[in-house]
Image: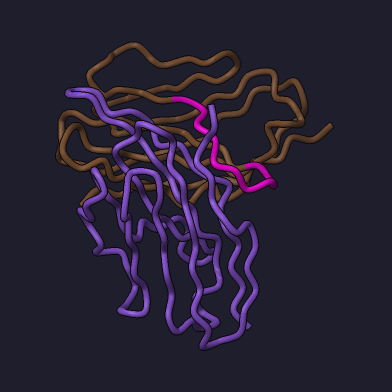
Chain colours: A purple, B brown
Amino acid sequence: DAGVIQSPRHEVTEMGQEVTLRCKPISGHDYLFWYRQTMMRGLELLIYFNNNVPIDDSGMPEDRFSAKMPNASFSTLKIQPSEPRDSAVYFCASSSSTQGSSQPQHFGDGTRLSIL
Amino acid sequence: AQTVTQSQPEMSVQEAETVTLSCTYDTSENNYYLFWYKQPPSRQMILVIRQEAYKQQNATENRFSVNFQKAAKSFSLKISDSQLGDTAMYFCAFMNWGGSEKLVFGKGTKLTVNP
């Protein structure tokens, strides 16, 4: 089975540019998560969706960040305008839930974002 | 809010030996899940092992086992017969039972297995 697919794997762009990160969750999973990983702050949850609906976006750093999930098989995380401090590895993860039993999250390979 | 603490930023072990990574957490909940994830240099996040808080028996997966002490809020990972491929960052994570599926991660422990 295909895992969580993220693209691009690497992104280098200049400050001020718009950046779009993409994620395809595992088919049948109803939860989707976006994380950011930096040396200083570790793994931080930015936002997560359940059945394509954003549930908690309290981790989104500021208005420059936005995330969408137009359907069950696709999500985007957008940064506009980008800043050097946004440089990090961004992970997408998905999971499924059955009543009374949460399933572990499966992670994509991440996108390494560098803002110059 | 729940917190997860990994007090060992770095550890090393000789190949074939056993190593234990520590994790403590803070929660007022009674039912929850605990996980260990491995992140090798390739940067993938790989699930190593999972424990349900209501189960008294410690989870095991081949060479990996946990020591879950609910009263002490401790969840350590033991790796037996360490292999070079075990070199990675190891993250402990907490999830509440039901409702939110949010994972709270510790800062990680960098494990190096030496030949």
- Of residues B10 and A36, the one nearer the viewer is A36
| Left or right for A44, reference B73 | right
In the rendering, at what x and y percent does residue A113 appear?
Answer: 58, 68
Callout count: 0
- Furthest-bottom residue in view? A16
The residue shown at (49%, 42%) is A107
Region of the chain picked out in magenta, as a range: B40-49
- Of residues A112 and B6, the one nearer the viewer is A112
| Left or right for B26, reference B11 | left
**Quadrant location of the C terminus of chain B in the rendered image:** top right
Compared to A56, does B70 lie above or below?
Answer: above
| Left or right for A19, reference A64 | right
Compared to B25, does A38 lie above or below?
Answer: below
The residue shown at (60%, 43%) is B44
In the rendering, at what x and y percent does residue A88 appear?
Answer: 55, 66
Q: Quadrant of residue B55?
A: top left
